Image: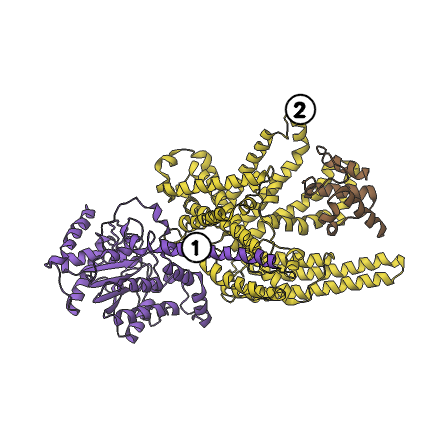
Chain colours: A yellow, B purple, C brown
Amino acid sequence: MISYTSFAFFILYFGITFLLYTIAPCKAKWCVLLVGSYVFYFVSSKGHILPLIIATIAVWAIGLWLQRLNDIQKVKRKEAPKEERKSIKALYTKYRQWVLALGVAITFGILLVCKYSNFFIDTTNSILGLNINNVSIIQPLGISFYTLQAISYLTDIHHGKFEAEKNPLRVSLFLSFMLTIVEGPVARYDQLGRQFKELKAFDPQAFVSGAIRICWGLIKKVVIADRTAELVNAVFDNHENYSGLAVVIGILFYTLQLYCEFSGVMDVVCGLGEAMGIKMPENFNRPFFARSINEFWQRWHITLGAWLRDYIFYPISLSKPFMSLSKSARKKFDAYYSNLIPTAVALFFVWFGNGFWHGAGWKYITYGLYYYALMMLGLFLEPMFRRLCSALKINRESKGFHFFQMARTFVIVNFGMLIFRADDLKTAWEMLKSIFTDFSFSILRVGAKNGFGLDVKDYIVIVVGVLLVLIVSILGEKGINVRERILALPFIVKFILFMVMIYSVIIFGAYGEGYGVVDLIYANF
Amino acid sequence: MKEMIKGYIKPCIKILAFVLAFFILLECLSVTYFSKARASQYNNKYSETMSFFNEPANTLQIVGIGNSDLYSGFCPPELWHNYGYVSTSIGSPRQTPQQSLDLLKEVYSNQKPRLVFIECDMLYDEPPENVDIKKDERDIDVFFDYLSPDSFDEGVKNVFPIFTFHDRWKNKKGVRFANKNHGYKFSNKVVPVKVHEGFMNKTDVSEKIVKIHGKNLKAMVNYCRKNGSDVVLMTLPSPSSWSYERHNAVVEFADANNLDFIDFNLMLDEINIDFAKDFRDKGNHLNYYGAKKVTEYLGEYISKNYEIEDMRKNKDYAYWHKSYRQFKGQLV
Amino acid sequence: MEKIIEIIKEIKPAVAIDESTKLLDEHILDSLAMISLIAELGDEFDVEISAADIIPENFETVTAIKALIDRLEDED
């Protein structure tokens, strides 16, 4: 796999593509992107491109089929007398649903086989006591991401959001785009695909703005996240040797690592896109200011949450059977709890899907259902909680209460991270227990250096980095866009500031000898 | 129109000016504070690997090059003490043949070694049990290796050493490095080793060396020979990362290139390797006691096969006696 | 129009709304509130709002919601 933060990517794959992209005429720029993306994918996955090509062809063909049915339906309804229109609509909707189901089955099927085969085999083995051998299938690069994009593309055509793309190469670019395929964001066709049709000439302002963003992302990923990896790996890979406060520190640092890495890479990817005049969807919005789990997942991995909302939550909760179920419930019971029924079922699939998407294992499913349980608990208790607060005269809109909510969310998220990062559920439980049974501050005395593999200077860098991120985030939350402010500064100031930023990454980056290779965490999903 | 171009060209020129300034600064830093020579002088994790920079010009007679197996098992101070040979070990953890080639080229800029030992553990990236020997390397795999970040990034780091030595700021300030180990990593830790069944069982099968490593190995051999050195291949004792299949592949290469090959894994009894006492980890790296045995054998081998001068009585090399005393100080 | 505002107020009592309040931008309608809203709207105006209709343009403001309902009522 070719990491986004390697020289090879910046200079060879992106660099050459960008140069050719800049000099190509506007109408041909998308072709440069397509070729560049496929070369990158081919080398990154060592020639393993067949699953992507099969999925692309299937998606393109089914998209056109759905479009054709849409068109026929329109024509027939226009020609028909008024009484028949409803039945024609129903009939063709049924056809289209079957075609869509076929498309989803193919793309999702490829994903299931490539990624989840061994999970199914192992689960079957343990339930039925068999001993079927595991298969060795290489998981294609980016399959978790392009499958979601494919399903969204087909579903949107089915709903008539836009017309199917006739050119298979454009569909291909949408699914294989170099900047989205490794770690997302999960893009929508009407947002990204349309931009590929309107690519603009080189814009120096956009280039500089993008460059600053790339640099910021590199600081988060290479300076902060990769540095904390040492500590996190020490605690989680040798968990028998750590307990109490050490485990807590390990979890907190993992949350820091995951946030800085994932949002840092997203900054790099969005910055690269911006340099090319392409607006990529955002995946992070200062998640630790969230005051509830619901809000957290609207600020963390935003495109995944949006995908689950639009393609699982709404279709299930607004489906006819559920709507009529809650309608009849509302006649007898409280409106709030009646509406909770379709919500509860739909949310189950959302969270199961979230967990399962992250990995082929019970640990990940538990991760998703952990959030489901907490969310349902919260929704269920909400009316009582509201009454309690007004009885106790607690102001839920006060700054103090907001802070309490943020802290509560932070704690919940960190327990989730424990489940996510631990080797398996059993280990997570052991580690959790050890926090309470073995609580001691001795780890601080023993010396973080021996216990965690980092030295004082490393910790200083981490602290400075975290403060920087915190300041920028707080400013952002107050509506101050730091990047815009920087762009408005005089040239000399920008010049020096940017040079300092780049050299911070080069000099303080945690790469090279003695740091270990830190693979992109999300690229394995 | 003129304004539009001005609004476009002026920013572009500014961007290019920045890029230029960036590269100039990169090069300046790479040849001063972050250079390879500086890395050898200050106490950081590279000072041992780069210690050859500190050897006075044209003094080295013997150079060992390889990965961590080499710097754990080949001990220049002992070679000096018992035979008077002036040598150095140039190795870093997981050093690749490509990195070794780059380092060798640095050596020859001010040294003329008579003999170069190339440690062959670096020809294989994974331990034997992780590799499927029967799978042939596809031509396209070679292509992928060249275009992978490992190769490409190495090249960039070689051109701009700042990327390799960027964390110099972490070192203890101003502690000038005393070159007492000459590249050897001292360790008197003892970890008993349990050798797995079938280690070095004779077989006809050969585990092919991947093309990119083979190519770089050949380049190293040619480079050394072109500069007047003899080359000997060797593999130090390493039960966890060697096998008879790998031995066969190196023998093939050695025969094809007219090289001697000393495989210590087949001479364990001859040099009295004791698995209970001679390793510092679970069978990958020798400790000082094991290194002494290997170095003793090498000293004998060199004195029998090569005309290399014993420098112990030579006044110009008196500083080696001092550095040996400093080296011995570690043993207490 | 007033009916729609009334329904939204029942779901989110703490917020003041008029026809042009940005319901989505100001995070008044999140996905959970949306379900309750659509259920109630479906009851009140006897229309079927499906997942396909949940696009920002249809729920930006109360005016937009009214337009959506009018359209669905016309479509038999």
User: For the residue marked with disc 1, what is the amino acid?
Assistant: Ala
Find the distance from the CA under tag 2 to the CA under tag 1: 65 Å
Name the secondary structure under disc 1. helix
Q: Is residue A126 visible?
A: no
* B202 relative to B327, above or below: below
Q: Which mark is residue B21?
A: 1
If the image is split into quadrants, where does the C terminus of chain B sit?
Answer: top left
- CA neighbours of label 1 inside 10 A, class few (<14), some (14 to 19), many (20+): some
Image-quadrant location for residue A79: bottom right
Front position in the image: B30 or C22: B30
Front position in the image: A242 or B51: B51
* A340 relative to A5, above or below: above
Q: Label 2 is found on which chain of the structure?
A: A
Name the secondary structure under disc 2. helix
Residue A35 rendering spot, x and y as whole percentages:
56, 66
User: For the residue marked with disc 2, what is the amino acid?
Assistant: Ala
Residue A469 rendering spot, x and y as whole percentages:
50, 42
Residue labelled with disc 2? A391
Q: Nearer the viewer, mark 2 or mark 1?
A: 1
If the image is split into quadrants, where does the N terminus of chain B sit?
Answer: bottom right
Residue lying furthest top: A392
Residue A329 rendering spot, x and y as whole percentages:
77, 40
Front position in the image: B305 or C71: C71
Q: Is residue A83 left or right of residue C68?
A: right
